[in-house]
Structures are given as C-alpha cells and as structure tokens.
Amino acid sequence: MLTRYLKRGNILLNATNNNYRELLSTMLAKSAVTDISGIIDKIFEREKIMPTALGKGIFLPRVILNNIERTEILIMVNHDGIVFDDYGTTVANVVMLLLLSKRDDYTTLLAQCLRLLNDDCLRSDLLHCRKVEDVIKTIRDWEEE
C-alpha cells in the first residue's frame, strides 16, 4: 500500500516552481534524505534514458537509493498545472517522487504508482484536493477499492 510510505509533510499543494530541478529540490527538502543535489543528478541521468513525464499531467521521477532504510513517496499536486522552463511544454499537475529503498519491493511500489496515476478518476480527485489530508485520504480510498 502506497499510503504506508506517505507522510503528511511530504505532500505539496499548488507549488509554483517553474523549474523542474527546483521543484525536485523543494520536494526533497521535505524528505529525510541529505544528498539532495546528488539525488536530483541521478533523476536527471535516468531521465536521459526514460522520461519521467508520463502524459496527462503526470510526472513520476524515481531513484533507487542504497543508503535509505525505507522508501519515501513525495507528492506535489497543482490543479492549474506547471510548465517547467527546463523541461519543455509538458504540463505537470501531479509529480510523485519515489525515493526507493532496496529493502522494499520497489518494483511492486512502482507498478502500484503507475496504476494509481493512470486512473483518470483518481487523478481528477487528486486535482480537487485542497488539503494535504485529502490527498492521503483519496489515495487510501483508491487502495481500499
């Protein structure tokens, strides 16, 4: 279940960063990790192989980290969407950043994130969330269906 990896403090609503790297930095500042620039560099390296923009306003940046005990999921939701100066014309409404621990079943977590983010109804519900608690409840309700 994804909600096991969600913390109230790891969710941003209506961030206004118009630079993808800066948004990732803002999100990572909420996490327990310390090597923020190193993680962002790893995300951008991976980005060269497979973009994190999935379409429909969804970004799913992810990185596997050897030095963390537990996977962290950080989420940014912006109803209006953000176009990043450093990414092109792709609009981002939901950015789900996965800091994956090798100790967790990260392939299953990634698959569940993809299923969640491909659900049009859930995405719409997320975009209507006005409070952090609503984001967690929306995902929890989806998981329980």
Image (cartoon, grey):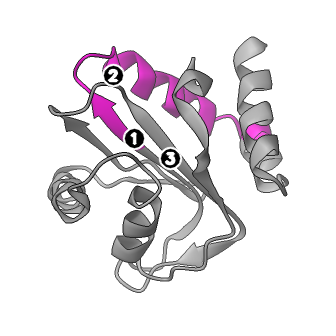
Q: Residue at x 19, y 51 (%)?
A: 46
Q: Residue at x 42, y 36 (%)?
A: 72
Quadrant assignment for the C terminus: top right
Task: Please tell me which of labels 2 and 1 falls first in the chain.
Answer: 1
Whether 117 is among the magenta residues is yes
**Residue bearing mark 1:** 98
Which numbered mark, 2 or 3, is in the foreground of this view?
A: 3
Q: Which mark is residue 106?
A: 2
Q: Which mark is residue 87?
A: none
Percent across and percent down for residue 47 are 24, 57
- What kind of secondary structure does the magenta stretch mostly adopt? helix
Tell me if 44 is positioned left or right of 58 in this view: left
**Residue bearing mark 3:** 74
Q: Amino acid at mark 3?
A: Leu
Task: Please tell me which of labels 1 and 3 falls first in the chain.
Answer: 3
Task: Please tell me which of labels 2 and 3 falls first in the chain.
Answer: 3
Check disc 3 and report its element: helix, strand or loop.
strand
How many residues crowd mark 1 within 10 Å: few (<14), some (14–19), many (20+)?
many
Magenta highlight range:
98-122
CA gap, disc 2 and disc 1? 9 Å
Residue positioned most to the bottom: 85
Q: Please say if 118 is above or below 38.
A: above
How many residues crowd mark 2 within 10 Å: few (<14), some (14–19), many (20+)?
some
Check disc 2 and report its element: helix, strand or loop.
helix
Task: Give the image quarter of residue 64.
Answer: top left
Marks 2 and 3 in Cβ contact (< 8 Å): no
Q: Amino acid at mark 2?
A: Tyr
Percent across and percent down for residue 87 are 37, 76
